[in-house]
Amino acid sequence: MWRLLLVGLLAFVVLLILGVLLLFGRGRSDNGLAQHSSPTAPPTATPRFLTPAVTPTPTSNLIMSLPTVTPMPPTATPTPTVTPCYQTAQQGDTVLGMAYRCGHRDLAVVDLILEINGMDSPQQLQLGQTLEIPWPTPTPVPGQETPTAEAAAETGDIAPALTPTLRLNQFGTPDALAKYENIEPTLRPGHAWHIVSEGETILSIAYAYDTTIEVLSQINPEIPFLQCDYGDPTGGPNCVVLLSVGQRVRVPVPLPSPTPTLTPAGTLTPTPSATPTINAPYPLSPEDGARFAADQLVTLRWGSTGTLGSQERYIVHVRDLDTGQEYTASVAELSYVLPGGWQPADRNRHTFEWWVAVGTLDEQGAVLSERFATAPRRFTWDSR
């Protein structure tokens, strides 16, 4: 009985194993069929078009065609108009003296002034007449090249026409005149040196020493006083005096008072003090023995240690030593141009002697007295 059960059990186990094997084999078969019956197509790739690389060819010169632009002409800079130096003749004025106030120091300018103003000779000058006088040309410094107008326009460095070139002489003064280089460096009685400081003007110096522009111009003949009106204490609005730092300017100062001398009695006997306003002229040019040709003007110049009073004038004496003729003139300026009538006309060269004194005049202009006459000097003048 138990054998039947064992056989039946073995049969059941065998059937069970066969069923499992059958199920396992069918599952693998279904899975393999599924894989082969439904193949998945690879994704379709979008075709790409390859562009061949282009290598740029280097160009040595790249020429661009651009329209030509014509530059506009530069805007012209307006040049300031320089007016001439106008001077009105006063009592005792001469043509050269009026040119001197405008900065001229060359006798040749007299002929130019006469031509501009339609005059034939300096003697035609009338009291109250106004002369048109051109400004002097600045004197270039030796060794320094003066730029041309074209070069100045290119650099933009254009100096005003009225700005003279400064050249210091041996006295530390801007030397606009080589003729005045012989001015003695020593000081006359009643004078002192003032050293110009930063920011000082001729007007501030005049105020500091209680003097006037006219006095300073008379005792400093080497300094140009351009277009100054001596009737105005300030020199007028057109007065131009160029000063530089460190320059020496003569100024009037009181003379030192003498020390009183004690007398045996014990009283003080003061010696009268000299007045500081003494005006003693001294000759400047021409030098002793100078020679003038027939076509040259003779100009006498002198300096002074003070200023003229209301009734005073400089009395100019000129004596022709060959004929004995003596000429005189009274002027308020520090120079005098000899008239053509004083020149010899006998075809011979004459020797002249000249000196200057301070004269006192009466109401009619006659000379009452003279004092402080300068030492006489001589010159020769060819006949016209």
Image (cartoon, grey):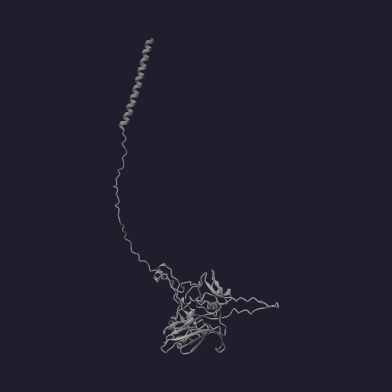
Which residue occupies the foreground of this view, 328 or 153?
328
Q: How many labels does the image show?
A: 0
Q: Nearer the viewer, residue 56 or 367?
A: 367
- In the image, residue 169 sits, relative to residue 299, either above or below, namely above
In-front residue for pair 308/319: 319
The residue positioned 35% from the left and 24% from the top of the image is: 24
Location of residue 135 (image quadrant): bottom left
Image quadrant where residue 215 sits: bottom right
Extreme right residue here? 265
Where's residue 11, x and y in %?
35, 15
Extreme residue in the top direction:
1
* Quadrant occupied by the N terminus: top left
Q: Which residue lies furthest to the front in this view?
A: 264
From the viewer's perspective, tell me whether residue 48 is left or right of residue 148. Answer: left
Q: Where is residue 44 in the image (x, y as percent from the top left)?
A: 31, 40
Residue 141, how many percent across, how many down? 44, 71
Q: In this view, does 333 lie to the left or right of 54?
A: right
Image quarter in which the C terminus is found:
bottom left
From the top left corner, tell me how far across and down residue 225 is, in percent. Answer: 51, 77
